Image: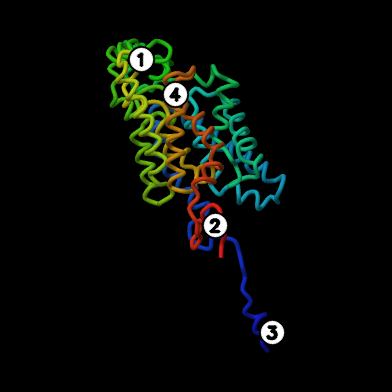
Amino acid sequence: MLAELNLEQRLILRSSPHALSKEQVPHVMWTVVASLAPAALAACWFFGLRALLVIVGTTLACVVFEYLLLRTRVDARKAMLISLDGSAVVTGILLALNLPASSPWWMIVIGAGIAMLLGKHLFGGLGQNIFNPALVARVFLLLAFPAEMTTWLYPKSGAQFAQLPNLAAENLDAVTGATPLGMIKADGLQAFLDWCASSGTNLWSMLWGNTGGSLGETSALLLLLGAGLLFWRGYISWHTPVSYIATVFVLTGIMWLVNPHYYANPVLHILSAGLFLGAFFMATDMVTSPVSAKGMVIFGIGCGVITAVIRLFGAFPEGVSFAILIMNGLTPLIDRYTKPRKFGAETLKRGEASA
């Protein structure tokens, strides 16, 4: 009788975590898609059909590559279900927001293939990747096709078109030029300030999005709006983005105070380029970032230091992608030294034996 009772009421041991949640992968991923929608729509508004084609093309290509790569391991039905869980769509939109509006179709396809193969499935698929797939693809494209990746279009609503005669502005489809940080890196701060004065560009233009750059640099304000949804849902915390942005602000601010005639205002560094996109949507990736609050702060500070060093002293005008990828590689080490003490565990002093 006792044996039967033990068999019926046996204790089943499983690994943690034991907490259950109604949040499933598709729900999380499609919420992230919704949070990226304001910035994506702003890109379409500023750059028109070109931006829409880049976003739709990159997203569809990522979904197709996801399905094809899954078919090598699972049946067609399961591959279709997984490829539509939203994770490939998130990667596609993030990659599109890291590309210029002038991106040719063949570069979009190559970037999507690199993101899904080298950035994701080479490591085992969703939840196993070490690096952010969209950033892996962006850095690959930047190194392989630097001309295409640095051909920036200005939005027609921007001050660059306002300088042109009405007839010229009406007949032109697009105007290309450098980003604010690119102009500072190539021509110096004074040349950039002169350009701002002649074009009417100011910090509000950078906040709203009337300057050139990648699709994700269009509107810092709308990126903040989308990030607010992720904060409200509890998918991200303040630790990584705040420590990241604050570190960039402090380091660039110190250099600006040392030599304001050579180094740009720290507010310009915060609002320009892809800092907000990287800090809120890619540095906070659940898979490739630390799990503890302390680890997240260390991760954010590391990203901020690398970004500031590249912007201030490096050959590239931007360093967000490189910074996040480098810190992705350090995430296991950060997790190892910042993991919280196990519940009920006691730290023994050296030489002290347990009872």
The colour style of the image is: rainbow
Total numbered labels placed on residues in the image: 4
Does label 3 or label 1 sit earlier along the sequence? 3
Answer few, some or many: residues within 10 Å of disc 3's Cα (few below 14, many 20 plus, some between 14 and 19): few
Q: CA distance from mark 4 to mark 2?
A: 45 Å
Residue extending furthest right? 72
**Identity of the amino acid at label 3?**
Ala
Of badges 4 and 1, nearer the viewer stands 4
Q: Amino acid at mark 1?
A: Ala
Residue 352 image label: 2
Q: Picture coordinates of residue 141 (x, y %)?
A: 57, 25
Residue placed furthest toward the bottom: 1
Task: Name the kind of residue labelled 4 in the image.
Answer: Val
How far is the residue under mark 4 from the one under mark 3?
68 Å
Q: 175 or 257: which is nearer to us?
A: 257
Q: Find residue 169 and name its label.
A: 1
List the residue tagged with mark 3.
Answer: 3
Q: Residues within 10 Å of mark 2 (few under 14, many from 20)?
A: few
Please give the residue where the numbered disc 4 appears in the rendered image. Answer: 309
